[in-house]
Amino acid sequence: MGKWMVRAALLLLLATVVNDGGRYLAALYRIDDVTRNMAFAAAVMAKGRPGADTGWPAVATLAQDSGVEVTGYRQTGNTVVVTTRAQVPGTWLAGPILAWVTHQPTQAPLTITQEASSKS
């Protein structure tokens, strides 16, 4: 009976690692792709009209379409830096443990951030 309990626990741990790792990697790929696209689109707009925030409309449009939250935007000339944040919902162990460590409700999803810059 003890061997089956150990095997079941290892199988559950493996399933958790696959679930949490897969969700994290998929979210990381998505936020990286979206953030780079935002920075590139804003830099292209800024190239034609350098100013304080001429590329912002492109970033705002892409943010609405993707579900990624923009937490920072900086433009100097035709160089744009975009910082974003996204949630990783559905993690079984990583999200609740990180939430517990940071004194948040255990239902709070794991959050990742990304920064990208582009010069056109």
Image: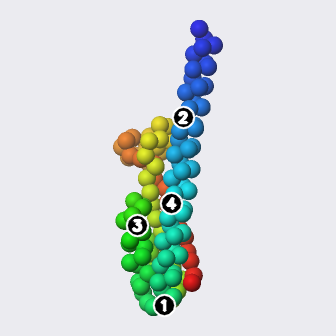
Split into 4 quadrants, where in the image is the C terminus? bottom right
Q: Secondary structure at mark 1?
A: helix
> Crowding near pointer 1: few (<14 within 10 Å), some, many (20+)?
few
Q: Is residue 11 above or below residue 35?
A: above
- Callout 3, which amino acid? Ala
Q: CA distance from mark 1 to mark 2?
A: 49 Å
Q: Residue at x 39, y 64 (%)?
A: 65
> Crowding near pointer 3: few (<14 within 10 Å), some, many (20+)?
some
Q: Residue at x 39, y 59 (%)?
A: 67
Q: Earlier in the sequence, mark 1 or mark 2?
A: 2
Q: Which residue is mark 3?
A: 63
Give percent across and percent down for residue 61: 38, 71
Give percent across and percent down for residue 96: 44, 40
Q: Which residue is mark 2?
A: 16
Q: CA distance from mark 1 to mark 3?
A: 22 Å
Q: Is residue 81 visible?
A: no
Q: Residue at x 61, y 18 (%)?
A: 6
Q: Earlier in the sequence, mark 3 or mark 4?
A: 4
> Crowding near pointer 4: few (<14 within 10 Å), some, many (20+)?
many
Q: Earlier in the sequence, mark 1 or mark 4?
A: 4
- Callout 1, which amino acid? Gly
- Callout 2, which amino acid? Thr
Q: CA distance from mark 1 to mark 4?
A: 27 Å
Q: Residue furthest front?
A: 65
The nearer-to-camera label among 4 and 2 is 4
Q: CA distance from mark 3 to mark 4?
A: 10 Å
Q: CA distance from mark 2 to mark 3?
A: 30 Å
The circle on residue 31 is 4
Q: Residue at x 47, y 37 (%)?
A: 92
Q: Which residue is mark 1?
A: 48
